[in-house]
Image (cartoon, helix red, strand yellow):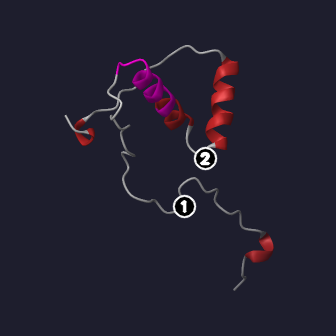
Amino acid sequence: MCNADMPRSTRAFRIDERLLEALDRLAQKGNISANKYIENLLMSHAKQVGEIPMDAEPLGDPRGGRRSNSGRKKAVKKESDEVEN
């Protein structure tokens, strides 16, 4: 089964809030989502312990391609920027 055919699953875990906050900070430092950070971390660990082949690659972004304005905050218009008719 190739990566394109591999599904992603959603699961819920109870995790210490301090750990979640640390994962958020680490992901932010790496400029990636916390979900992607955790997925990469678990993939690396599973390879190291022999549960996944060393040549296995993580799944790609399911949204595909570069998305314009992804992750960017929308600019807030100031009253002075608006033009009156």
Viewer-nearest residue: 75 or 41: 41
Determine whether, in the image, residue 85 is placed left or right of residue 49: right
| Callout 1 amino acid | Asn
Depicted 79 relative to depicted 64: above or below: below
Viewer-nearest residue: 42 or 11: 42
Provide residue 47's location: percent of width, then percent of height. 40, 25
Q: Position of residue 68 (x, y in %)?
A: 49, 63
Cα–Cα span, label 1 and label 2: 15 Å
Dot 2, crowdedness within 10 Å: few (<14), some or many (≥20)? Answer: few
Query: In the rendered structure, which amino acid carries the disc numbered 2?
Result: Asn
Magenta span includes 47? yes
Q: From this view, report whether residue 13 is shown above or below residue 10.
A: above
Give the overall secondary structure of the magenta segment: helix
Q: Secondary structure at mark 2?
A: loop
Q: Quadrant of residue 78?
A: bottom right
- Residue ID for mark 1: 69
Q: Which residues are magenta?
A: 40-51
Is 39 rendered above or below residue 66? above
User: Which percent across, then down, holds residue 1?
Assistant: 19, 34
Which numbered circle lies on residue 55?
Answer: none
Disc 2 designates what residue?
A: 31
